[in-house]
Amino acid sequence: MDYETLKLIWWLLIGVLLVGFAVMDGHDMGMGVLLPFVGRNDLERRALINTVAPHWDGNQVWFITAGGAIFAAWPLVYATAFSGFYWAMMAALWALFFRPVGFDYRSKIQNAAWRSTWDWGLFIGGAVPPIIFGVAFGNLLQGVPFHFNDYLMSTYTGSFWALLNPFALLAGVVSLAMITTQGANYLMMRTEGNLYRRVRGASQVFAALTIVTFALAGVWVAKGIDGYVITSAVDPNALPDPLAKTVEIATGAWMRNYAQHGWAMWVPVVAFAALAASLAFARLNKAGAAFWSSSLACAGIIGTAGVSMFPFVMPSSSDPRSSLTVYDAVSSHLTLGLMLGATVIFMPLIIFYTAWAYKVMWGKVTTEYIAANDKSVY
């Protein structure tokens, strides 16, 4: 397989891993966001926790694999992003620390203050990472202030607070609303009674919020943010060298792919249609259809960001020539080929094991079940 094809396959595969993370770990995080609000007493909150507690660490595989794939396939992106977004990424990791401890120790002690503290800890672990990841995507669309020297050593010239600009914060709200919708739709499938009615209401509210904020972000990208365009010839099979090209910042450049490739418009269209379907299915009490719709919406929203920026992965606002693209931010031909072989073998195994685990432990989690199994459940 030639080098260009491998570069494009890994752009697609990393997108698939990010969508898998949003769909699988997203419904865990969405549960954490909703936990302090839809669970009115300890039994209801334990019922919510037990819908995801047996699976959340397995779902983390998507997060770890996506991070590992970016490290191995796009090492320059990994190194540059973690330099620029260092404190933001550390904040996401610190927030994630609340999840394993909260799941395992919350119900070990019969103390209301202890359990309430961990409920809010799980809320932080569910809400903060998607906000930060959304803010990161918002900054990528605007360009990140970094540049390379002649030895390809990157220097980040921005600040942590500059990352919290209005458009990036809006992208963070899109991400949080999307993940919370995913969590609410999952909980609709696993709860009943008053708890079901509350998560169903939350699903409709956050699906509507996702539609509004995603549309606002789209208008902002089209009208208020400059994009990037490569102005020199690109050899897709050449060895990676980010400085071997010229790039210009141009008004409306992020919309060029939609103008040149009509099929690309279907990606945001699918996102909006899937969100509308999620809202409708939640109103009709079709929990399973709502979950699959919001899963498709996750793919559409993440895919829209990828298609808009292609072939850019991490544009540089301070030195456009240093921008990282699908063609010049990658590992060697051999590394990409070996990684693809491992992915073909192990990704089906991960999907099969995950499906089997959910099938074995599927069913409604009720407050009566929690009360009857007080010593053995989370």
Image (cartoon, rainbow, N blue to C red):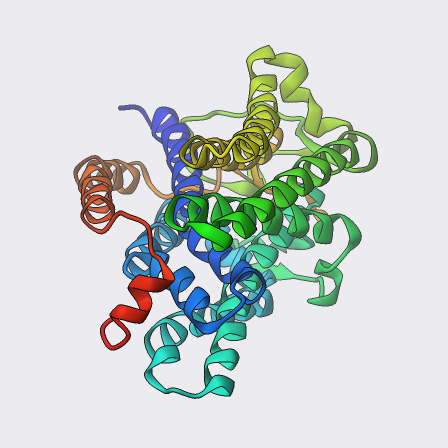
Q: Residue 67, percent across and down?
A: 40, 53
Residue 146: quadrant of the picture? bottom right
Q: Quadrant of the C terminus?
A: bottom left
As drawn, which residue projects farthest toward the right? 224
Q: Residue 49, percent across and down?
A: 39, 64
Q: Quadrant of the N terminus?
A: top left
Whether residue 128 is situated above or below residue 228 in the rendered picture:
below
Count all numbered tags in the image, as a single digit.
0
Q: Residue 253, percent across and down?
A: 72, 27
* Residue sitting at x 75%, y 61%: 162
* Residue sitting at x 47%, y 54%: 78
Residue 32: tell me if it is visible. yes
Give the left or right position of residue 140, taking residue 215 as reference.
Answer: left
The foreground one among 127 and 20 is 127
Q: Residue 299, percent across and down?
A: 48, 34
The foreground one among 231 and 253 is 253
Residue 326: tell me if it is visible. no
* Residue sitting at x 54%, y 73%: 120
The foreground one among 357 and 69 is 357
Whether residue 253 is situated above or below residue 156 in the rendered picture:
above
Residue 367: quadrant of the picture? bottom left
